[in-house]
Amino acid sequence: MSSFMPLTLFAPIMLLTAVSVALLVFPGRRPGVLPLLSESAALAALACAMAGVFQLLIHGSGQVSFLSGPLAIVIRLDAISATMTLLVAFIGWIVMRYARTYVDGEEREGIFHGLMLATLAAVLLLVQAGSLAVLVLAFLAVGIGLRRLLLFYPERAAARRAAAKFALVWHAGDVSLLLATGLFFAAFGTGEIASLADASASGLTVTAHIGVALLVLAAALKTAAFPLHGWLTEVMEAPTPVSALLHAGIINAGGFLLIRTADLVQASPGAMAGLVMIGGLTALFGAVVMLTQSAVKTALAWSTISQMGFMLLQCGLGLWALALLHIVAHSMYKAYAFLSSGGAVAAVANLRRPGPIAVPSAAAVIKSFALALALYGTIALVFSLLAGPKSLQALALGTMLIFGVAYLVAQGLADAAPAALTRRTLSAAAVAAVAYFAFQRVAAGIWGHSLPAAPIVGPLEWALIVLAILSFGIVAVGQTLFPRWAHHPAASGMRVHVANGFYLNAVLDRLIGGYRVAKSN
């Protein structure tokens, strides 16, 4: 790895320059040219990110260091940081462009632009981190900036409660990351991530194992993992650009933390097992609750919780490249979903009403799952023959994904379903399986050389994989059969409890005094 100045570093510098203008010159309503300046700064940051990609292609990976010891400031350019910088910069530009009209005429319009740019700059610095010190400082800055944005409408009680809960959970993650940094320095004498990766190859000490556990805890807290997920469902009181930036960029930071320190995390089997359990539970819990939500933004928030859980599961399985691909895809989709949510209700209302839904029988459900798994197995065999054998973790993850497609196949196999629907659902299952293995190859080609391969599967890993497959399968079968008993009184009662997330968020409110926060002036 060579030493040079990554051009991506100028992306946050561009934004911070605009921040000084926003907060010092145009802090109020109708701040003149500031909205255009903010968008231009975000576009300039995107240009710097693109320049960094070309720099990587020409010169290869590299980094620049400032200071030494535990406070070493290292900025790194490699395939991972270049991808994330380009992603964050692109989403940031889109969000700032949208914000020009969204907050037009607000009393603190100038301050809003300044806070958005500062928070975006902190995220851009975070994804370029080459040392733990940079990660700690960037995470802290992101938390401070986002809390201020969540309080943009301080008169709203729900906004004050959401900001208080976010600050508690996010900064608890900061403390956990800071403690992990101290333990790693004590164990290895360095805070540089590349050096830590090399040192972990020979095994971890007890101190380092504790550090990895704290690292995983920090990532779980920052991805709104179960059971401290509630704050993410309450941030809808913030302006829509804030929600888009949060769900498309900031919430992924916990996953990036794990991917950036993948060598360290994978050296601890206990940490990997913890990620599988936390991620799988969060993914299933979020998906089930999401299906019961009627509000568009709330459903999107629960979707984010589920997706972040699935991403943690991927990290726990050692499928690091797929986890990074998941972050990229989720960010793009979720930014679009939030920015277009205002017209979602009208769009649905204008849709042509479909006919009666074909309700599959139990026999059709069993047949659909068997058929979907058979298609998946055949395609997996073909890809293995053509491109080499797949890891057990990759095959297991694909099995979990195909369960979701099996739901569609069941609709096509229902007695009342037309033949065209049957053909389409079967085609969808085949396309999903092919796409999974194809994208896996693409992800491995782009980021595989920068990330460790999936670990060898031992007894613990076998048990967790089987448990995960069975859990996802049971939930998928339950979802498929739900229309047969949805009208039962017990189902209606259960729906209320599920829609409220089994009241875990209310418990957190009571524990932290969230209700008192909401009532305060």
Image (spheres, rainbow, N blue to C red):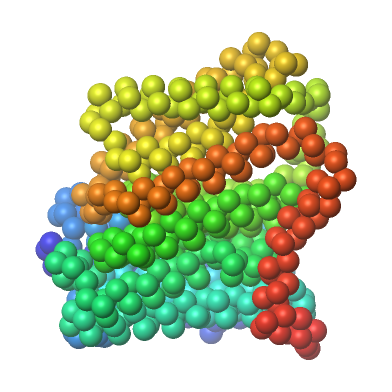
Describe residue 370's horizontal placement relative to residue 296 as left or right. left
Residue at (33% x, 24% y) in the render = 381
For the N terminus, which image quadrant? bottom left
Residue 183 occupies which quadrant of the picture? bottom left
Describe residue 364's horizontal placement relative to residue 308 as left or right. right
* Residue projecting furthest to the left: 2
Give x and y (percent) for residue 506.
Answer: 73, 72
Residue 210 occupies which quadrant of the picture? bottom left
Describe residue 445's horizontal placement relative to residue 227 as left or right. left
Q: Is residue 37 visible?
A: no
Q: Nearer the viewer, residue 154 or 427?
A: 427
* Residue projecting furthest to the top: 419
Q: Nearer the viewer, residue 488 or 230?
A: 488
Give x and y (percent) for residue 265.
Answer: 31, 64
Up-down relation of residue 71 to residue 349 (above or below): below
Residue at (48% x, 27% y) in the render = 373
Residue at (71% x, 24% y) in the render = 361
Give x and y (percent) for residue 404.
Answer: 56, 36
Residue at (14% x, 67% y) in the render = 202
Give x and y (percent) for residue 217.
Answer: 44, 72
Q: Is residue 365 visible?
A: yes
